[in-house]
Amino acid sequence: MPHLFSPLKIKSIELKNRIVVSPMCQYSSTDGFADNWHLVHLGTMAVGGAGLIITEATAVSPEGRISFADLGIWKDEHIAKLKEITTFIEAQGAVAGVQLSHAGRKASHAEPWNGGKQIQPDEENGWQAYGPSALAFSRSETAPVELDKAGIQKIITDFKDAAARALAAGFKVVELHGAHGYLINEFLSTHSNKRTDDYGGSFENRIRFLLEVIEAVQTVWPADYPLFVRITATEWTEGAWTITDSIALAKVLKDKGVDLIDCSTGGNVAGAQIPLKPGYQVEFAEAVKKQAAIPTGAVGLITEAKQADEIIQTGQADLVFLARELLRDPHFPLRAAHQLGHQVKWPVQYERAKW
């Protein structure tokens, strides 16, 4: 059996293979609600054979959205459609996961196909963005309002309440979005966090917000269900967050009960030079896995079956997160199994097309 198609059990949840649908923003919601686009988008990935399907960044509060069209889970009314989606995913033999997110200073933007520019609070579809410090992401943007401690505690509660709704909606895996320049990442990095209180300065203080979010989530999330954290393993900028920081963080997160580190990079430093190439982020997943002794997920320009299989076979990561390749071919897992000489179960409706 190819390593890519070996099952993986994390706590009480077993994944049928090592292929994960990475969170991919769709910017297709109204007031945070999932609709038939999300059902078909995520459902197609499940039909295509992925083991774990993770929603796009799902906002824990309205002001935590990247754009006004983001998916949300900040009110109970969001649960019903999400439950319909998770039920369909599970019927295909896959596991449903949700990525809980707060955009921080990168909130209140237009959809990317409409320019993606920051929308001001007094403009239509805009609102006030908040961050750990009053520092704008780029020179062309307005600085967020620095969060006070009451604001921090509200967001921690928002994450907890969102996790409870995720459970009610049928999700079996929660991933906390601590990457790509969004709020958790902003607290972690000295590039975006200039606070002088308990949430800034030292490494221990800068990771405090994430640890408090984790502790709050764990009060409502079952102990036998997996909890992942996505991180920016490096900011590709001298003097900012590095792989050394990520390894140190991963060791702490392991002790706090986190089950897997999803290793992405970049997103918090405007203009950072990122050396894009196939599998360019895999080395960071490998470093965290080996030096922090915690399972990891690899993501980033992974497009070939053999490439994905080798990542698992060589022990560089435990899961392979695919994004754009699954947009191009939602049935990549079925094709990958064929290319690797492995027989997998197809949906009976599709068996006539089986190689």
Image (cartoon, rainbow, N blue to C red):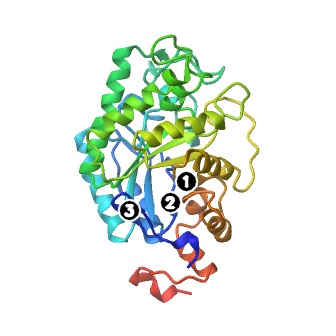
Q: For the residue labelled by badge 2, is the local secondary structure a helix, a strand or a loop?
A: strand
Residue corresponding to mark 3: 95
Q: For residue 94, say whether it is visible.
A: yes
Amino acid marked by disc 1: Gly
Residue at the extreme top: 196
Residue corresponding to mark 1: 297
Residue corresponding to mark 2: 20
Amino acid marked by disc 2: Val
Q: Confirm or deny contact between disc 2 and disc 1 (CB under 8 A).
A: yes
Q: Is residue 38 above or below residue 1?
A: above
Quadrant the C terminus occupies:
bottom right
Identify the image quadrant of residue 12. Answer: bottom left
Q: CA distance from mark 2 to mark 1?
A: 9 Å
Q: For the residue labelled by badge 1, is the local secondary structure a helix, a strand or a loop?
A: strand
* Comparing labels 2 and 1, the label whose residue is closer to the camera: 1
Quadrant the N terminus occupies:
bottom right
Amino acid marked by disc 3: Val
For marks 2 and 1, the one nearer the N-term is: 2
Residue 241 located left or right of residue 129: right
Residue 291 drawn at (x, y percent): 61, 45
Residue 81 located left or right of residue 250: left
Q: Which residue is at a point 64% across and 21% down the rendered structure image?
A: 140
For marks 3 and 1, the one nearer the N-term is: 3
Q: Is residue 41 above or below residue 164?
A: below
Considering depth in this image, is 300 or 233 the residue closer to the camera?
A: 233
